[in-house]
């Protein structure tokens, strides 16, 4: 079995920011309500002229350059997203934008778990010897799919993309992982297609419509995350044969500061090891982990050989954890 290593990271967020205070022009809310319940203070919003392809390409260029390879070295591009520019797939558009001419490219959908699911998927291609250099991107523009009149959801989300390069490596730096899905709880968090029946010829109907804005049962999602995330991190740690005190950094999906705090407390991980950038970006779905990772690397917090525990969780419901060494 071959090993894998993450050899570079990059990220990109839209320039336009929206502060909590500005949201009070839109819905009945307050900076105080949002920041105390979620930890979010502002979020970045993609403007109509911006695309997921552009954000993903910018993040990818950063990751490729940090890894010290060129785009033509990439064998595989995985784009974890729930908000593609094109439902037929957006990874190919990213491939063209960065001129990764040798890469096969496809999208992967696992909502806020997308980056962790993508990390494990990318690793399998490398471990089997099929590919050597994989570009994994987590990117979402959820601002296009929230109901901006619904204060229970519109205050939570932001847009962005993060990317990493994974390469074949002598020692395996992906130390352990665990993934889970529970479709019986699917109804707690949705972005569903809804079509109106249209009779195209007598007795033959099709459903034509569009995707409907995000609906969420906040309390249920909170309960789910606070319970399942510590469990799955424990499982991945067990598989990695790593103890909690060996973890240098905890990077959770940035959904809510209260979830992050609850998980860290359950696992007995002290605050100074917990990475959080939720205040600046809100919940960027599949992008939140790679953006947080990239920032921490560029700030010099994460150093070579540090052990990182990460967990993504969200719609599906789906959740997963990975333990890796930088
Ligand atoms: N501003 C002001 N008041 C609000 C707002 C808002 N933006 N949103 C809801 N309220 C009101 C509600 O209407 C309710 O009022 P009522 O009692 O008169 O009916 C009151 O505040 C309390 O609402 P709850 O939904 O009970 O608030 P809660 O304390 O559960 O906090 C929150 C809501 C922050 C969403 C919480 O449930 C949570 O953190 N859930 C986790 C979900 C999450 O993070 N999802 C992110 C997306 S999923 C993912 O990425 C995994």
Image (tube, rainbow, N blue to C red):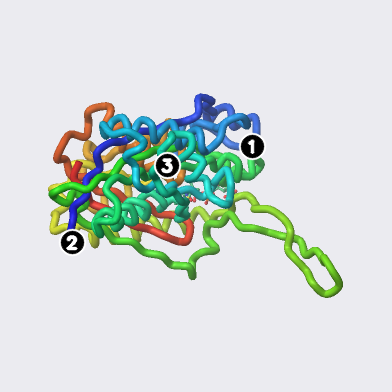
Q: CA distance from mark 3 to mark 2?
A: 26 Å
Select label 2 or label 1 by which is in front.
2
**Does residue 145 appear to the left or right of 182 in the view shown?**
right
Query: Which residue: 52% across, 45% down?
Result: 90
Outermost residue toward the right?
Answer: 202
The answer to whether the residue labelled 3 contacts the one labelled 2, judged by CB atoms less than 8 Å apart, is no
Residue 71 in sight: yes
Q: Nearer the viewer, residue 256 or 174?
A: 174
Residue 280: percent from left, percent from top: 43, 31
**Does residue 177 appear to the left or right of 277 in the view shown?**
left
Select label 3 or label 2 by which is in front.
3
Depicted 243 relative to depicted 134: above or below? below
Q: CA distance from mark 1 to mark 3?
A: 26 Å
Dot 2: few (<14), some (14–19), or many (≥20) neighbours within 10 Å? some
Q: What label does residue 238 carry, if any?
A: 2
Whether the residue carrying mark 1 lies under 8 Å from ligand 1 is answered with yes
Q: Quadrant of residue 193?
A: bottom right
N-terminal-most mark, 2 or 1: 1
Which residue is label 3 attached to? Answer: 287
Query: Which residue: 54% across, 25% down?
Result: 16
Depicted 59 relative to depicted 289: above or below? above
Q: What label does residue 27 carry, if any?
A: 1
Q: CA distance from mark 2 to mark 1?
A: 45 Å
Marker count (numbered): 3
Residue 47: percent from left, percent from top: 59, 30
Q: Nearer the viewer, residue 87 or 48?
A: 87
């Amino acid at each position: 079995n071959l090993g894998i290593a993450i050899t570079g990271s990059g990220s990109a967020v839209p320039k336009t920011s929206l502060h909590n205070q500005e949201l009070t022009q839109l819905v009945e809310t307050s900076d105080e309500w949002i920041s105390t319940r979620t930890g979010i203070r502002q979020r970045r919003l993609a403007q109509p002229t911006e695309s997921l392809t552009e954000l993903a390409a910018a993040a990818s260029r950063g990751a490729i350059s940090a890894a010290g390879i060129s785009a033509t070295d990439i064998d595989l591009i995985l784009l974890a997203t729930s908000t593609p520019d094109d439902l037929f797939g957006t990874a190919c558009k990213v491939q063209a934008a960065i001129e990764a001419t040798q890469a096969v490219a496809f999208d992967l959908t696992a909502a806020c778990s997308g980056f962790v699911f993508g990390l494990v998927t990318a690793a399998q291609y490398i471990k089997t010897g099929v590919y050597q250099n994989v570009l994994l991107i987590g990117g979402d523009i959820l601002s296009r799919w929230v109901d901006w009149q619904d204060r229970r959801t519109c205050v939570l989300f932001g847009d962005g993309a993060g990317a990493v390069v994974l390469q074949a490596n002598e020692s395996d730096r992906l130390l352990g992982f665990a993934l889970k899905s529970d479709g019986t709880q699917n109804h707690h968090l949705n972005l569903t297609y809804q079509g109106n029946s249209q009779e195209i010829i007598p007795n033959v109907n099709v459903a034509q419509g569009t995707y409907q804005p995000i609906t969420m049962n906040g309390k249920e999602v909170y309960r789910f995350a606070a319970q399942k995330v510590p469990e799955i991190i424990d499982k991945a740690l067990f598989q990695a044969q790593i103890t909690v005190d060996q973890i240098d950094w905890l990077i959770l999906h940035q959904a809510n500061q209260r979830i992050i705090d609850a998980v860290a407390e359950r696992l007995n991980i002290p605050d100074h090891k917990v990475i959080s950038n939720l205040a600046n970006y809100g919940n960027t779905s599949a992008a939140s982990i790679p953006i947080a990772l990239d920032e921490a690397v560029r700030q010099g917090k994460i150093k070579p050989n540090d052990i990182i525990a990460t967990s993504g969780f969200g719609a599906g419901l789906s959740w997963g954890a990975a333990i890796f060494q930088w």
